Amino acid sequence: MGAALPAGRGVRWAAAAAAAAGLTLGPGARGGAACCAETGVAPARLGVGNAPARPRAEQPVARVPAAFERRCIPPACVVRRSPVPDMRSPRALSGGPPAVLGAARGFTTGGEGTADLRTALDALAALPGEPRIVSAAGVARDETPLLTLENPSPFDAARPQRRLVIVGGLDGDADAAARIVLDAVRWFKTEAPERERTRWTVSALPMALPLPGGPARPGGFPPVGGFFDDPERPEIRYVWRWVAYQAPDLVVDVRAGDGLRIRSRAAGESGGDDGIPAGSLAAALADPVSQPRLGPVDTLLVTAGASDGAAVMRGALARAPDRPSPLRRAFAARTGSDPLSVARLLAGRYPGAPSISYIPALAWVHSLRLAALDGDDSLRDKVLAEVRPWLSGDRPLFGDRVSFAAVAGTMIFSELAQSSGGDRDAAARLAAEGVALARAETAPGVPRHGSGWSDDFFLGTIAAVRAGDPDGLAAAVRLVTAYAARLQQPDGLFHHDAGAPTAWGRGNGFGALGLSELLTVLPPDHPDRAALLDAHRRHLAAMRAEQAPDGMWRQVVDEPGSYRETSVTAMTLTAMARGIRLGWLDESYRPVVDRAWRALLAHVADDGTLVDVCIGTGAGPTRRHYLDRPAVNGADDRGGAMALGAALEYHELLQGD
């Protein structure tokens, strides 16, 4: 176990290692200062490690070639670049302690130690080749980030390289295992034969359980019950999801020990005398029962000494199977689906619970759009049958309390009122009722039925947008203008509420989707259009910068360790695809959208069920409130409707190619 460093010394050592790699440590890491709808209440921003959540104005921030490549997390540790020396030379780290890229002598858990690990990863990312993106797989209960080194291609069929994921620290000796993993990756990037570097790409999670106070409880895989909101062991859940969604062909679980020992288990084996303990990551991932929807993967359980990092990677590559894993093939099947096939799957399944709410209404509106594209009367008939109780007057539109979520549900009647059929008059009457409630104000820009949350960008405007009502559109413009002034931050992201300063994922999705819908119908000469378009562009530029390496967006957009969430990904993809198609966004957004589409597909199973959709969420008092919101895994009307819309918008974008 690496010894804890004296106060201040770890940062100096980390700075020396960073300098050797041609980097200058950001002030956040040097200074050691503490840093930091749909239901509802009001949060202090929580920090990660020693770094402030946003760089100060005087901090020079490195700009990378592609917006999604972020080499230091969070931004306060972003570095100034200087010429990068040959890291294969022993002189590269002379004048400092033993190199954090070689035999680093300590990553204490939390605090300064997290900054040290982050700096070591930054230096490793700066070396030529993959992996080159520093991110995080999750957030520990004590809010230490589970830092990762990733590549942007887990779901990219155009990247045929085999995929290896290496994980350290699951035995509780996180410090020693992290050093071994870093050495292994450094050897791969600097000394591995060109043939292996061409054939393989690597992702690394050096310190999977950064838990102070002794060894972690053994096992825990696969996690059962709860997920990212688990009150005791969320780290296990984050690790499980991250490893699987790196689409690996081989997973290497590294433990610290006195010598090198490599034990293997082939994909599909559920046990044996190989010495791999039940409940370990290696045992669970190889077992076909653990992830029946995805499949197993070959694993290695490696015990290694402090100087064995290079040998670990050499041994892993030598034992690697010569075929894609069943897990990798499952993701390839998902991500190979065309947009209309996905849309048909989702339209046939959602909504599962018809009601007058934005959730089923979105599914209905998108289903009608798909029915028109396909000439499918049966899909239109399905929608009409599900809304019949309201068209007939058998059920009232609203209960005792009127919310924007319900008002937004009346968008379906605007769609039906503009189509042929005998229900047009009833639909027009119901649509007008919704628009009247949407445009009601207590003061200009203050809607009577709004929550004040960023949800209202979409929920408070979509009824008027779909109806094309002039007075309703005027009220929508006032709402969006007032909310943007109150909730949009200097970096472009939206806080969920003025009293809840967190960039909640779906809250930003509502902002992206609401502005996109409003700009679609607002006349080119509207006096407020330019200002709204500027707010929209600034927001989407901020979202682009926060895209996760795999193409997803996160539950807390600017918290790299928060879980990668499906609904915000679908909503942001939709807004960006439309922006490209209609000329609001330039072509630099196209690879961002393409990666988001592949990532979204990876989270849609072949029966239309979904992975990691945040449940309904009101404004909360802390950032932890959002990190701990449960994620739905299975059928979900909200996520299904959003993914259906994304599939149709991406299809439209492809038609322009």
Image (spheres, rainbow, N blue to C red):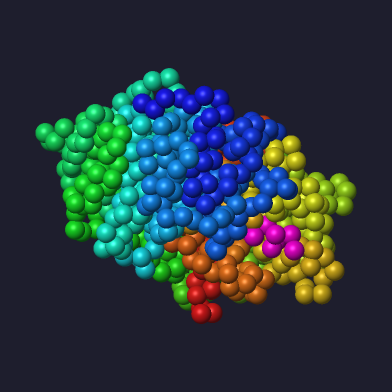
Residue 278 percent location from the top left of the image = 22, 31
User: With 470 as the anchor, is 420 left or right in this view?
Assistant: left
The quarter of the picture where the N terminus appears is top left
Does 45 appear above or below 196? above
Residue 457 percent location from the top left of the image = 71, 53
Residue 9 shows in the view: yes
Magenta stretch bounds: 534-541
Does 473 appear above or below 75? below
| Quadrant housing residue 242 | top left
Residue 331 percent location from the top left of the image = 34, 57
Most common SS among magenta residues: helix
Query: Could you tell me which residue is drawn at 45 percent across and 35 percent down?
Result: 97
Q: Name the one closer to the observer, 451 or 424.
A: 451
Determine if the magenta segment contains residue 81.
Answer: no
Query: Could you tell me which residue is drawn at 19 percent across and 36 percent down?
Result: 261
Q: Name the one closer to the observer, 340 or 43.
A: 43
Q: In this view, which residue lies farthest toward the left?
A: 273
Q: In this view, which residue lies farthest toward the top?
A: 213
Q: In this view, which residue lies farthest toward the right?
A: 443
Q: How many marks?
A: 0
Q: Name the one closer to the observer, 209 or 19.
A: 19
Q: Name the one closer to the observer, 286 or 107.
A: 107
| Quadrant housing residue 227 | top left
User: With 159 as the anchor, is 70 left or right in this view?
Assistant: right
Residue 636 shows in the view: no
Residue 473 percent location from the top left of the image = 78, 63
Query: Could you tell me which residue is drawn at 82 percent across and 71 percent down?
Result: 526
Query: Could you tell me which residue is drawn at 48 percent across and 50 percent down?
Result: 21
User: With 435 as the anchor, is 642 left or right in this view?
Assistant: left
